Image (spheres, rainbow, N blue to C red):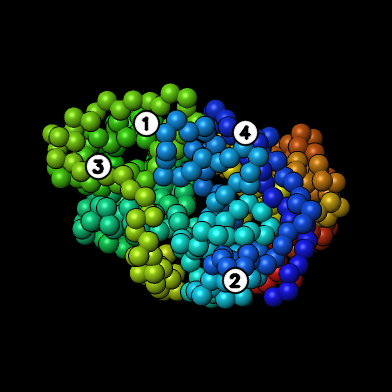
Amino acid sequence: MAEEVMGSKKVIFKGYITGLPKESDMEIVTANTVRLKVPEGSTAVIVKNLYLSCDPYMRACMTKPDEPSYFAAYVPGSVITGYGVGKVLDSSHPDFKVGDFVWGMTGWEEYSLIMATEQLFKIKYTDVPLSHYTGLLGMPGFTAYVGFHKICSPKKGEYVLVSAASGAVGQLVGQLAKLMGCYVVGSAGSDEKVNLLKNKFGFDEAFNYKKEPDLNAALKRCFPEGIDIYFENVGGPMLDAVLCNMRNHGRISVCGMISQYNLEKPEGVHNLFYLIRNQVRMEGFTVAHFIPQYHQFEDLIVRHIKDGKISYVEDIAEGLESAPAALVGLFTGMQGFTAYIGFHEEGEYVFVSAASGAVGHLVSQFAKLMGCYVVGSAGSDEKVDLLKNKFGFDEGFNYKEEKNLSAALKRSADFHFQKAASMEHAEQLLA
């Protein structure tokens, strides 16, 4: 491939932080020149990034390190790194050819030179969504598989609790547990997520931890006979309550502790004695130590996907400019982010259903800020009045009073909605 020189957008980390991350902690810049040719004598690859993963561990990389960690801290003034999916544009590595799709550690930028190829994987299955390789078939999915199957050694009929259960890792843990014949409960931070766990991912039970005044009582309600396996994603008070409810010879797989990442002083854990009393094994892990088993995992999950045994939900933000908001959204609530990522261009005609809801009314305000004409539907005249007089919709209607919804839509506005699909969208990105 002949050497080419072109511009490339990238997301720069500005400096170490404390507390919650902010979009202003990152900056979008454009490099004037990018060489799309690997250095002579190397075994590097150059990729065009198609999808970039946004994961909670990245917050830890934004803190000035006091001691070495399993993820290196970001360097102020440098490109943010994370897992992603890309297409190989040039390669001097024998395992990666031009045109291959790959996933692994890359930069938050349009084009990346990847020198460290040890944890770069050629994508084997291109007939499933490529975006799954940042989640379900990537690091989060592999984490779920390793933490559940390899650390917890589950058995049919056991009682399993998953915290942060609607997240990229948790939703797969729950489904793997159900496929093993376990009884599965998940905790999440909203009623909408609880509904998702029970009605889409097949959890036996779920609860909104924000509505539980006593987590210990909530766990005893869900697990009157105790917990065999706890997949730990959050830490803090949840972990403390779980320790009191573990059964003899229970196992706790420690994947992450998202509740602690933004605290200057982490919360203590007070009930560790239960590890001794109930002979509980608690083990932390990182997936890097299980890399040789990745393809075994990949084959299993793809088979489950094609058999319709596993569901997965993704939030996809369009464009590198959306990346800082996506990362911040992990810690400040995803409803606003969900609204933001589905939005399009100035001057378009936009229709929003369930428009008075937590997501819908924010969609409209993003749309109005972009100069769009916005119509919303709601279930009462009072809500329609709210849409038009408080949230600034151009028009609204009560769908319960419309005999012909098609006619109502044509009367109100023309609208257009686009949703990217995996391979087709990836090819469009490369065009």
**Residue 144 horizontal/vertical position (percent):** 38, 55
Marks 1/3: CA–CA distance:
15 Å
Marks 1/4: CA–CA distance:
27 Å
Q: Which mark is residue 91?
A: 2
Q: Earlier in the sequence, mark 2 or mark 3?
A: 2
Marks 4/2: CA–CA distance:
32 Å
Q: Earlier in the sequence, mark 1 or mark 3?
A: 1
Q: Secondary structure at mark 1?
A: helix
Which residue does the numbered mark 1 point to in the structure image? Answer: 236
Residue drawn at x 57%, y 71% as measured from the top left: 92
**Residue 409 placement, left or right of 230:** right
Marks 1/2: CA–CA distance:
45 Å
**Residue 422 placement, left or right of 392:** left
Front residue of this view, candidates 71 and 170: 71
Marks 2/3: CA–CA distance:
42 Å
Residue drawn at x 37%, y 46% as measured from the top left: 255
Which residue does the numbered mark 4 point to in the structure image? Answer: 15
Q: Examine the rendering and report whether any part of residue 240 can be seen.
A: yes
Q: Earlier in the sequence, mark 4 or mark 2?
A: 4
**Number of numbered discs on residues:** 4
Q: Nearer the viewer, mark 4 or mark 2?
A: 2
Residue drawn at x 57%, y 30% as measured from the top left: 17
Which residue does the numbered mark 3 point to in the structure image? Answer: 282
Q: Secondary structure at mark 4?
A: loop
Amino acid residing under circle 4? Gly
Q: Which mark is residue 258?
A: none
Q: Earlier in the sequence, mark 4 or mark 3?
A: 4
Q: Earlier in the sequence, mark 1 or mark 2?
A: 2
